[in-house]
């Protein structure tokens, strides 16, 4: 059994980790932290976990966490980098769900996250936890930087086109919509029901912190710089990301459908739908699947890729559990076999 600690057990991704790990055959949940709810039983705060999780929240304490095999940090950006050194020194593997170890360049981190990096020496070692690209590196890692939700949907959608040199990489467009849980459980006015329901808006058009993350990921695969326009939107859903991706084909003769099918044929969590399909976010709700469809409207030279995930599962906690499975040599699907929930 794998001894597990979670820092930030009261946030949406923390609760989602608890839900998934409570049903995981090899998971032994040992420590779940909260600064605000220490002493309270997890199931008293989250009744969905009654009968599944017996633990109580404790204050974040490196000593208790150091006895775990793996710690998930489901904390706001900028927290994991303050405890990473100590946990790694204690021999614990660390999976950070935040952005602290995603960007390789500390100057880029400081530019987009507004604070200097607390342990830049770990950035090189950290492995970007997108299994469909980095599975072999994840196997050997001590520190996994779990990707952001938008970057997961966008990169998985674009990858086959870039890997095969089929598109003009200077003019990629990602138009993405997220449910409100993507912003976490914090209380903010723009996330109130009467502010976020029955309306839709773009945000961060001038620059969103996932833009450098997506570019870094695509550039690592391509080996050269890409031009990307990324526009996120807040939509009145609880869970889900829908990314509509556009690129100009430079090799119009390619059979895109079979290319996508072949690229993801052995991936347990990427489902390429039949030609002409329109994947829905609800088809992946609570599941770890990224569902993709590829289109070429009117047979023209623009390719449109539709990519959907559940932001809390493949976009966060599910992908983190997938990474844990890879780190410990388990079946990658362990604890992650749920189908989406319809209706
Ligand atoms: N929501 C989503 O869809 C996604 C989120 N992420 C990332 O995952 C991380 C967690 O997100 P989410 O669950 O939504 O966030 P929430 O705001 O819902 O939860 C944050 C959690 O962190 C704890 N926390 C806050 N500050 C500290 C601190 N200084 N030390 C220890 N614990 C702290 C909080 O508990 P307490 O205050 O009680 O200690 C709380 O449990 C974020 O970095 C987010 O960007 C990534 C992909 C998708
Ligand atoms: C709807 C919404 O607000 N979404 C969040 C992204 C959530 C996420 O993946 O954030 P991290 O990169 O910090 O892990 C946002 O746009 O900031």
Image (cartoon, grey):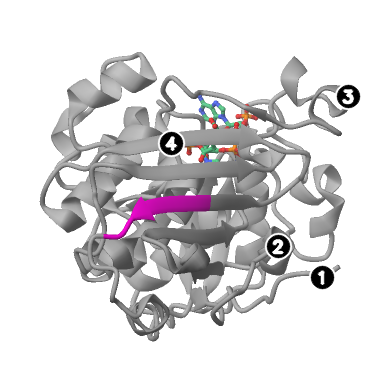
Front residue of 157/286: it is: 157
* CB at disc 2 and ligand 1 closer than 8 Å: no
Tag 4 near tag 3, CB within 8 Å: no
Q: Secondary structure at mark 2?
A: loop
Read off the magenta span: 244-249
Q: Residue 29 at x, y = what percent?
A: 58, 60
| Mark 1 CB lies closer than 8 A to ligand 1 | no
User: What kind of element bears circle 3?
Assistant: helix
In the picture, measured across the screen, residue 115 lies left or right of residue 273, that is left
Question: Callout 3: few (<14), some (14-19), or many (20+) C-alpha neighbours within 10 Å?
Answer: few
As measured in the structure, the alpha-carbon distance from the residue carrying label 2 to the one carrying label 1 is 8 Å
Screen quadrant of the C terminus: bottom right
- Marks 1/3: CA–CA distance: 25 Å
Tell me which numbered mark, 1 or 4, is placed earlier along the sequence: 4
Alpha carbons under labels 3 and 2: distance apart: 23 Å
In the rendered structure, which disc, 1 or 3, sits on the residue that comes first in sequence? 3
User: Badge 1: few (under 14), some or many (20 or more) residues near its Cα, within 10 Å?
Assistant: few
Q: Residue at x 72, y 36 (%)?
A: 39
User: Is residue 72 left or right of 92 when viewed as pictured?
Assistant: right
Residue toward you, 167 or 325: 167
Which of 134 and 158 lies nearest the eye of the viewer?
158
Residues under numbered marks 2 and 1 in contact, where contact means CB atoms less than 8 Å apart: yes
State the residue position of label 2.
285
Q: Which mark is residue 342?
A: 1
Residue bearing mark 4:
230
Residue labelled with disc 3: 194
Ranked by sequence position, the earlier of labels 3 and 2 is: 3
**Majority secondary structure in the magenta region:** strand
- How many labels sit on residues? 4
Q: Separation of disc 1 and disc 4 at Cα?
A: 29 Å
Q: Is residue 118 visible?
A: no
Crowd rating for badge 2 (residues with CA inside 10 Å; few <14, some 14–19, many 20+):
many
């Amino acid at each position: 059994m794998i001894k597990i600690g979670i820092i930030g057990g009261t946030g949406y991704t923390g609760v989602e980790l608890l839900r998934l790990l409570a049903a995981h055959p090899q998971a032994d949940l040992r420590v779940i932290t909260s600064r605000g709810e220490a002493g309270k039983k997890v199931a008293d705060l989250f009744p969905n976990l009654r009968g599944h999780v017996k633990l109580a929240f404790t204050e974040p304490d490196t000593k208790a966490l150091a006895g775990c095999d793996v710690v998930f940090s489901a904390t706001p950006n900028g927290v994991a980098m303050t405890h990473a050194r100590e946990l790694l020194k204690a021999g614990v593997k660390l999976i950070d769900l935040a952005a602290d170890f995603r960007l390789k360049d500390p100057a880029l981190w400081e530019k987009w996250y507004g604070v200097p990096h607390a342990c830049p020496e770990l950035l090189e070692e950290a492995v970007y936890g997108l299994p469909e690209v980095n599975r072999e590196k994840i196997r050997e890692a001590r520190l996994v930087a779990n990707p952001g939700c938008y970057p997961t949907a966008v990169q998985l959608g674009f990858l086959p086109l870039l890997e095969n040199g089929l598109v003009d990489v200077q003019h990629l467009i990602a138009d993405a919509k997220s449910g409100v849980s993507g912003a976490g459980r914090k209380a903010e006015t723009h996330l109130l029901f009467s502010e976020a329901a029955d309306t839709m808006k773009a945000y961060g058009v001038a620059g969103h912190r996932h833009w450098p993350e997506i570019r870094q990921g695509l550039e690592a695969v391509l080996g050269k710089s890409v031009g990307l326009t990324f526009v996120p939107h807040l939509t009145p859903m609880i869970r889900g990301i829908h990314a509509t991706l556009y690129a100009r084909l430079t090799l119009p003769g390619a059979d895109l459908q079979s290319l996508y099918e072949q690229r993801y044929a052995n991936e347990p969590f990427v489902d390429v739908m039949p030609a002409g399909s329109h994947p829905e976010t609800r088809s992946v709700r609570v599941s770890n699947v990224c569902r993709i469809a590829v289109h070429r409207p009117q047979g023209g030279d623009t390719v449109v890729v539709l990519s959907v995930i559940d932001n809390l599962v493949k976009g966060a906690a599910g992908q983190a559990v997938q990474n844990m499975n890879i780190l410990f040599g388990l079946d990658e699907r362990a604890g992650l076999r749920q189908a989406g929930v319809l209706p």
